[in-house]
Image: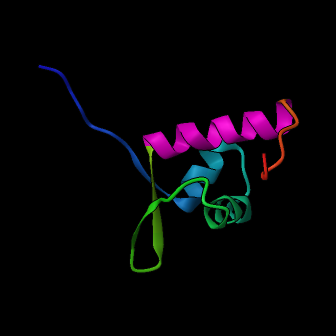
Amino acid sequence: MENNVTGVYVMQVAAMLTGLHPQTLRKYERAGLLSPSRQYTIRFYSDEDIERLKMIKHLVNDMGLNLAG
């Protein structure tokens, strides 16, 4: 039997997992780079969101891409 459980993380945990500041996560959301699910005012980041954030971080920090690119 395969376990299809996926993680759901609040902002502080997502920031820790990605090495990004929570304010950066908000900035990326405002820029339309990701859309975490919400319940009331709490953002929930999926495993897919975490992977996307890691890729954005790599593109920005390691490849020199800016948010407009």
Magenta-highlighted residues: 47-62
Can you say whether 56 is above or below 29 in the image? above
Q: How is the image coloured?
A: rainbow
Q: Nearer the viewer, residue 33 or 53?
A: 33
Of all residues, the one furthest to the top in this rendering is 1
Q: Nearer the viewer, residue 37 or 10?
A: 37
The percent position of residue 48, horizontal first and vertical second, equals 46, 40
Is 46 displayed left or right of 27 in the figure?
A: left
Residue at 11% from the left image edge and 19% from the top image edge: 1
Residue at 44% from the left image edge and 41% from the top image edge: 47
Is 34 displayed left or right of 30 in the figure?
A: left
Which quadrant would residue 37 be assigned to in this image?
bottom left
Residue at 62% from the left image edge and 44% from the top image edge: 53
Can you say whether 40 is above or below 50 in the image? below
Can you say whether 23 is above or below 15 in the image? below
The percent position of residue 32, horizontal first and vertical second, equals 60, 60
Can you say whether 26 is above or below 52 in the image? below
Is 13 displayed left or right of 9 in the figure?
A: right
- In the rendered structure, does residue 60 fall within the stretch colored magenta? yes
Which quadrant would residue 61 be assigned to in this image?
top right
Of all residues, the one furthest to the bottom in this rendering is 40
**Main SS of the magenta segment?**
helix
The percent position of residue 54, horizontal first and vertical second, equals 64, 37
Q: Nearer the viewer, residue 19 or 66?
A: 66
Q: Nearer the viewer, residue 15 or 53?
A: 53
Quadrant in which the C terminus appears? top right
Residue at 55% from the left image edge and 36% from the top image edge: 51
